[in-house]
Amino acid sequence: MRNRYCKYILGGLLMLLTGCFNAEQLSIDYMLPAEISFPSALRRVAIVNNMPFVNADSALISERHERFKGGGERTVKFHHGNAIYAAEALAETIADENFFDEVVICDSALRYQDTILRESALTQTEVEELTEALDVDFLISIENVLVKSTRQVIYYWRAGFQGLVTASVYPTIKVYLPGRRTAMTTLTCNDSIDWDQMTYDGSRVLEGLINDADMVKEASDFAGTLPVKQLLPTWRKSNRVIFTNGSTTMRDAYHYVREEEWEKAITLWEQLYNSEKKPKKRLWAAYNLALGHEMLDNIEASLEWIIRAEQLAKEVDKRTAEQDVRLGNTLSYSLLTHRYKAELEQRKTQLPRLKAQMSRFTEGN
């Protein structure tokens, strides 16, 4: 049965040159804990807009024009983001994760009357009034959204001209709890999105690209999705290898993997590891056992098996180097097992925090 923190997709076959066997690649997704942990009692949240109102005329902060090596040119601008779009995107993204019981939004600027653009944290009184009025346990506030845009033309010999717009976004949010004099935490993050087109007419290459007004809207919407990676547990995609051939037992175990019966596959791999004399086949079994236990969220057992696999890998790689150099092997078992062990060690340190954050779904059951 697939567990709560890990899921996978079987990929294509990999032909490994250290023998005539096949291995399957798995695309595995596992959960990472959020940077901050919310008490399980916090179940209703409101997303609020704590940025001053910015109209289209005052959104541009600064602008400069640059030329770079090769004859290209670019325009760099800094803009105030649109907090309404950012707040709506943040609320929608958090709601989609189903982490909290209720997500409400107050996207009207709380500082609409401000005449000077400034960062101003919510007071304790404002937090308490808002949480009571919105009937929520705490607030997540959009404090600032900065957008840096770069609009440039790049020439490629024989390929023509590329018009490129890149928007780097820098949102700042605060988390407020009633009863506290200051924000619980302040989070900042950054990322970028871009738009481009190719043409042979350098004088018209920028005409079809997104305009500044639409760019700021889309960039602000994108900015609102970014803090979720820090606020809530998220999925990380990684690749694994599973050894599928070499004996009848390995093939039978792989059949159980395809049926998602990891316990039965583990039983067969243990039998093979204990009965097999060849180091390479014991290595395959040990590596698969590490993977099997990871899929069952038993990271301790997974680490034990990958350590055994790593020890066998050193022996197998040494024999390969001495006896089979002419094959030009591209697979290093030592490198494969070392990288896997490093990722498992990272998961081990993160798992207690993840379980604590996800405990809100099991409390009272």
Image (cartoon, rainbow, N blue to C red):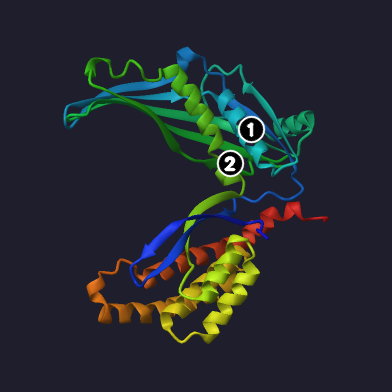
* Residue 360 in sight in this render: yes
Name the residue that disc number 1 marks: 92
Q: Which numbered tag is attached to residue 148?
A: none
Classify the position of the C terminus by image quarter.
bottom right
* Residue 294 in sight in this render: no
- Taking the spot 67% from the left edge, 59% from the top edge, the residue there is 355
The residue under label 1 is which amino acid type?
Answer: Glu
The residue under label 2 is which amino acid type?
Answer: Val
Residue 224 in the image: state x and y as whole percent: 55, 33
Label 2 Cα crowd, 10 Å radius (few <14 / some 14-19 / many 20+): some
Residue farthest toward the top in the current orientation of the protein:
57
Name the residue that disc number 2 marks: 228
Label 1 Cα crowd, 10 Å radius (few <14 / some 14-19 / many 20+): some
- Taking the spot 47% from the left edge, 70% from the top edge, the residue there is 245
Q: Kindly report which numbered mark, 1 or 2, lies closer to the viewer in this rendering.
A: 1
Q: Quadrant of residue 319?
A: bottom left
* SS at badge 1: helix
Identify whether 198 is placed above or below 32: above
Which is more toward the observer, 168 or 310? 310
* SS at badge 2: helix
Which is more toward the observer, 101 or 145? 101
Identify whether 245 is placed above or below 355: below
